[in-house]
C-alpha cells in the first residue's frame, strides 16, 4: 500500500512539474508517459529513502531512550522515597564528589542532598566504564561521608553504613537513603 501511495505521489509530482514550464520544448511535451515499471521503481526509491530516514530516526530515538535510562532510574527513586531537598550533579562535576571521571558516552545521573545536614545520595551510571574503579570511588566517597557524620548525626551515619551498591548488565548504582530496599527494587525492575 505504501509503495502504491508513493507511486501515485511521484506521478502527480512529475505531472505537476512538467506543466510548470510555459516554454517547454516540443520534445518534452511529446515525451512518452511514465510506465508502470518506471513508477514502481520511483516508488521503490522513494520508499527506500523513507525507510532509511525512518531507520535513522529510530536509531536516534533508541539512543535518546538509552541516554534517558539513568535519569529515569534516579527520577523513579526520587519519587518513591522521601528525600530532603536534592541537587543534581552533572557528569562534568561528578569527579568532585565521587573521584571518578565519567567517561564520554556513558549515561549518568546523580543527585546529592542540597544541604550538608543529610547524607542522601542517588547515583546511576551505564555504558563502557571501569566498574571496579567506579565501585572503589563509591567506597571512598562513603568512607569520607561517614567521617563527616560520625558523632554528628547518628541517623545519617546509619544511612551511610547501609548504603546500597549494585552492578549489573553495564549499570551501576549506589544510593544512600532511608529506604535502600526500594532503591534496589526500582533498579532491578528498570534494568533487568
Image (tube, rainbow, N blue to C red):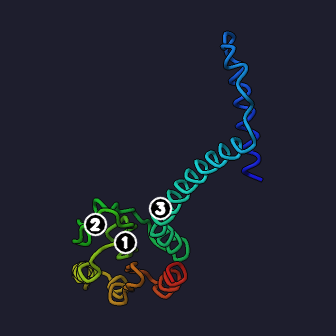
Q: Which mark is residue 187?
A: none
Q: Nearer the viewer, residue 30 or 117?
A: 30
CA gap between label 3 and label 1 equals 12 Å
Q: Which mark is residue 103?
A: 2
Q: Nearer the viewer, residue 127 or 113?
A: 127
- Mark 3 or mark 1: whose residue is earlier in sequence: 3
Residue that mark 1 sits on? 127
Q: Find residue 169 and report its horizontal and vertical position in percent.
A: 42, 82
CA gap between label 2 and label 1 equals 9 Å
In the image, taking residue 155 as reference, residue 7 lies left or right, namely right
Toward which corner of the image does residue 87 lie, by quadrant? Answer: bottom left
Q: Residue at x 72, y 19 (%)?
A: 29
Q: Is residue 42 above or below residue 169?
A: above
* Mark 1 surroundings: few (<14), some (14-19) or many (≥20) residues within 10 A: some
**Camera-nearest label, 2 or 3:** 3
CA gap between label 2 and label 3 equals 17 Å
Q: Are marks 2 and 1 in contact (CB under 8 Å)?
A: yes
Residue that mark 3 sits on? 63
Q: Are marks 2 and 3 in contact (CB under 8 Å)?
A: no
* Mark 3 surroundings: few (<14), some (14-19) or many (≥20) residues within 10 A: few
**Residue 149 appears in the rendering:** no
**Residue 14 appears in the rendering:** yes
Q: Secondary structure at mark 2?
A: loop
Q: Find residue 55 and report its horizontal and vertical position in percent.
A: 55, 57
In the image, taking residue 112 as reference, residue 4 lies left or right, namely right
Q: Find residue 61 and report its horizontal and vertical position in percent.
A: 53, 58
Amino acid at each position: 500500500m505504501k509503495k502504491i501511495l508513493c507511486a501515485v505521489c511521484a506521478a502527480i509530482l512529475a505531472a505537476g512539474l512538467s506543466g510548470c514550464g510555459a516554454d517547454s520544448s516540443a520534445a518534452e511535451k511529446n515525451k512518452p508517459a511514465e510506465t508502470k515499471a518506471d513508477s514502481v521503481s520511483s516508488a521503490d526509491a522513494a520508499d527506500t529513502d523513507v525507510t532509511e530516514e525512518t531507520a535513522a530516526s529510530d536509531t536516534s530515538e533508541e539512543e535518546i531512550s538509552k541516554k534517558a535510562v539513568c535519569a529515569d532510574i534516579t527520577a523513579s527513586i526520587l519519587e518513591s522515597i522521601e528525600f530532603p531537598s536534592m541537587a543534581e550533579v552533572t557528569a562534568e562535576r561528578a569527579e568532585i564528589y565521587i573521584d571518578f571521571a565519567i567517561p564520554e558516552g556513558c549515561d549518568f545521573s546523580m543527585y546529592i542532598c542540597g544541604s550538608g545536614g543529610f547524607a542522601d545520595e542517588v547515583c546511576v551510571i551505564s555504558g563502557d566504564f571501569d566498574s571496579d574503579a567506579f565501585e572503589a570511588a563509591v567506597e571512598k566517597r562513603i568512607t569520607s561521608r561517614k567521617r563527616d557524620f560520625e558523632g554528628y548525626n547518628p541517623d545519617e551515619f546509619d544511612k551511610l553504613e547501609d548504603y546500597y551498591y549494585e552492578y549489573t548488565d553495564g549499570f551501576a548504582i549506589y544510593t544512600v537513603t532511608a529506604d535502600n530496599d526500594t532503591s534496589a527494587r526500582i533498579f532491578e525492575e528498570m534494568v533487568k
